[in-house]
Amino acid sequence: MADVAQLAGVSSQTVSRVSNGFPGVTEDTRRQVLAAMRELGYRPNSAARALRRGEFRTLGVITFSLSTMGNIRTLEAIATSAAQHGYAVTLLPVAVPTQDEVNGAFSRLGELAVDAVIVIMEIHLLDAATVSLPPGVQVVVADSDAGDRYTVVDTDQAGGARDAVRHLLDLGHDTVWHLAGPEGSFAAQRRANAWRDTLRAAGRAAPPLVRGDWSAESGYRAGLRLADEPDCTAVFAANDQMALGLLRALHERGRRVPDDISVIGFDDIPESASFLPPLTTIHQDFAQVGRLCVEGVLDKMRQDGAEHGTTLVPTRLVRRESTGPRRR
């Protein structure tokens, strides 16, 4: 730093202010200092700066699955928002969701020097007696039902599912079949419960629930079964990937969409508009979920954030060509 200061003709304090992005330095002086840094190959020592400030400008992210589209898009949004706030992200996937693995993940993130942690927990864990997050760690949880104990950010799963079912009922369908996600998933349970409750509120009988695993292949297998159900005229798939497999199975069995069966998905992945036919779906604002997770954990670090509670991000119905009126 002294060498940079001498070459640029400024004080070491000025070099420090430029390297740390602090205000109070004229643009000409800033350019002089940056040019001297480039010429000398100077790079600020981030470890020393972290020790001096007491922060590492890094957020840890623990996730239990990188195989689902929702988790991947949430992680992308968190990384983007963190970068906008000047933070890096350290990712730590956890293969086996147990208390020991959770504790081990937090220990490893501590060794990697992170300031706070965001947990993407798409499966039921925090409501189980075997799993809890270590005390004293600033944490925000995405996609969980543990808002009574943690700060949680989630999509309005139930609201989106209600909109999907109501859309199909408004089109004249007597009832709506449901292709649900895996049994251990919080999001899948919320969507299935809302599907059943919405049919009950409308005075309609709920058909037997069909279970998938979020994959297009499971949607295809379910579609082969649903194609043989003579009373099936409308299906709400719990995600767009399963809806994709469902569309293929219906096509192979000669069931036209939406003339014979209407199909609606959930997520609004970028490819959903290119399905055949283009998929009506429920849009999730993953970018907003990521932003709120990052802002929430930064607020907690500043000790002015909520200790617990759930923030729901609204969904919206996106109408395309895969749903239509029931043909009598």
Image (cartoon, grey):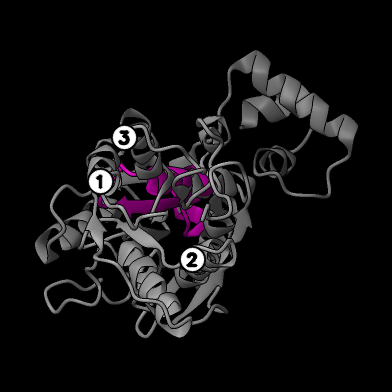
The quadrant of the rendering that contains the N terminus is top right
Label 1 CA crowd tier, 10 Å (few <14, some 14–19, many 20+) = few
Q: Label 2: which residue? A: 165
Magenta stretch in the rendered image: 51-77
Residue 249's disc number: 3
Tell me which corner region of the image, top left, top right, bottom left or bottom right, holds residue 131. bottom left
Residue that badge 1 annotates: 228
Q: Is residue 57 magenta?
A: yes
In this view, the residue in front, 19 or 73, is 73
Looking at this rendering, what residue extends furthest in the top direction?
A: 39
Residue drawn at (81%, 25%), measured in percent from left and top?
32
* Camera-side residue of 71 and 88: 71
Give SS at disc 1.
Answer: loop
Which mark is nearer the camera, 1 or 2? 1
Residue plotted at (81% across, 27% down)? 31
Q: Amino acid at mark 3?
A: Ala
Task: Kindly identify the amino acid type of the residue bearing the numbered disc 1.
Answer: Asp
163 w.r.t. 256: above or below: below
Examine the rendering and report whether any part of residue 9 can be seen: no
**Which residue is at the front of the view, 6 or 280?**
280
Q: Residues within 10 Å of mark 2 (few under 14, many from 20)?
A: many
Which three-letter amino acid code belongs to the residue tagged 2?
Val
Kindly report the distance in space between the C-alpha atoms of the residues bearing marks 1 and 2. 21 Å
Quadrant of the rendered image containing residue 121: bottom left
**From mark 3 to mark 1, how far is it between C-alphas?**
11 Å
Q: Is residue 224 above or below residue 205?
A: above
Q: Is residue 36 visible?
A: yes
Please tell me which of labels 3 and 1 falls first in the chain: 1
The residue lying at 50 percent from left, 32 percent from top is: 275
